[in-house]
Amino acid sequence: CGGHSGEVNARLLAGLLNDPAVREGLAHTGIAIPADTLFVAALHDTTTDAVTLYDGDSDTARHAGDLEKVAGWLQRAGRIARAERALRLPRADGEAGLPARARDWSQTRPEWGLAGCRAFIAAPRTRTAGRDLAGQAFLHDYDWRRDSANGFAVLELIMTAPVVVASWISLQYYGSTVAPQVFGAGNKLLHNVVGGIGVVEGNGGLLRGGLPWQSVHDGERFVHEPLRLSVMIEAPREAMSQVLRKHEAVRALFDNRWLHLIALDDSGKPGWRYSGDLEWESWA
């Protein structure tokens, strides 16, 4: 990622998973993909919420009806998402005006990106389905009961990869909001890119990183509330502690209070808070 498209990755993976030889190899490792399963890569345009299906990459004739149904679902979801986002964008001309806004190079705020992020939830999708999280949570559909027999390998992957990436995102927004002169990138209208590693404002000044002012402020108020990311995971506490014990860099994020770590109970409600040094305290 890092601001780059994942299109190539998605199309390559879909092609591999549709390859009979790859499926045969996976079957030998215990991963059996049904013969009638088709993998299709897609690209999500975050400024318009349009999703492009790369169904031409594979033979999709047998799945034409399924793909038509999926395309309809994605179009409806996109309209709903655009309508919600239009309410937050300054001078947005409703849902229908967002595509034109996204193509306008003079537009300093074509989207809010991940401004407002405040939570990361790894739990069964049923815990959050149908709830309005206001676009403020990173979601992972995770069931520790299916992962326990595998030594909590998926939990370890979640805590050492997506959680870490979410921390980068959250802390970049945090720093660019609480101390924009130090951690922000200033006014994007004046930016000149330097060596692909930062920007300067105008023809000189300090090399700046972080987010530009227009990414966290709408001209009248901040659109990002600087909160430490709350990582909520439905999994046994000992399993999470074991991951922290094994990965010191991840543990440091929580021990040094850059992030909150919360264990959800079997009903999906907050049960315990990580207090540091591999200790937990009751949420109540």
Image: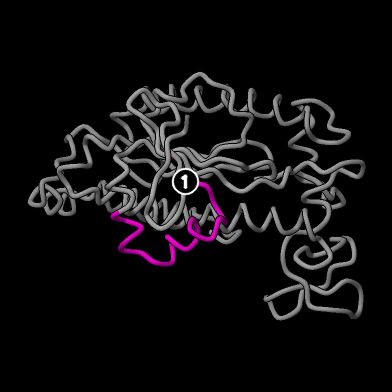
Report the front residue among 10 and 158. 158
Relative side of 137 to 175, left or right: left
Q: Taking 53 as reference, is 72 above or below it?
A: above
Q: Is residue 11 magenta?
A: no
**Residue lying at 78% horizontally and 27% vertically, measured from the top left:** 87
Q: Secondary structure at mark 1?
A: strand
Instruction: Give the total of numbered labels.
Output: 1
Residue linked to disc 1: 261
Q: x, y (%) of residue 50? A: 60, 36
Look at label 1 and name its amino acid: Leu
Relative side of 215 to 281, left or right: right
Q: Is residue 249 magenta?
A: yes
Magenta region, residue range: 242-262
**Residue lying at 55% horizontally and 40% vertically, measured from the top left:** 119
Q: x, y (%) of residue 67? A: 40, 28
Which SS does the magenta portion mostly show? helix
Specify the farthest residue to the left: 28
Report the front residue among 89 and 184. 184
Q: x, y (%) of residue 98? A: 76, 34
Q: x, y (%) of residue 59? A: 31, 40
Report the front residue among 182 and 139. 182
Q: Taking 224 as reference, is 188 above or below it?
A: below
Relative side of 80 to 111, left or right: left
**Residue lying at 46% horizontally and 39% vertically, measured from the top left:** 232
**Residue lying at 58% horizontally and 46% vertically, measured from the top left:** 229
Q: How is the image coloured?
A: one colour
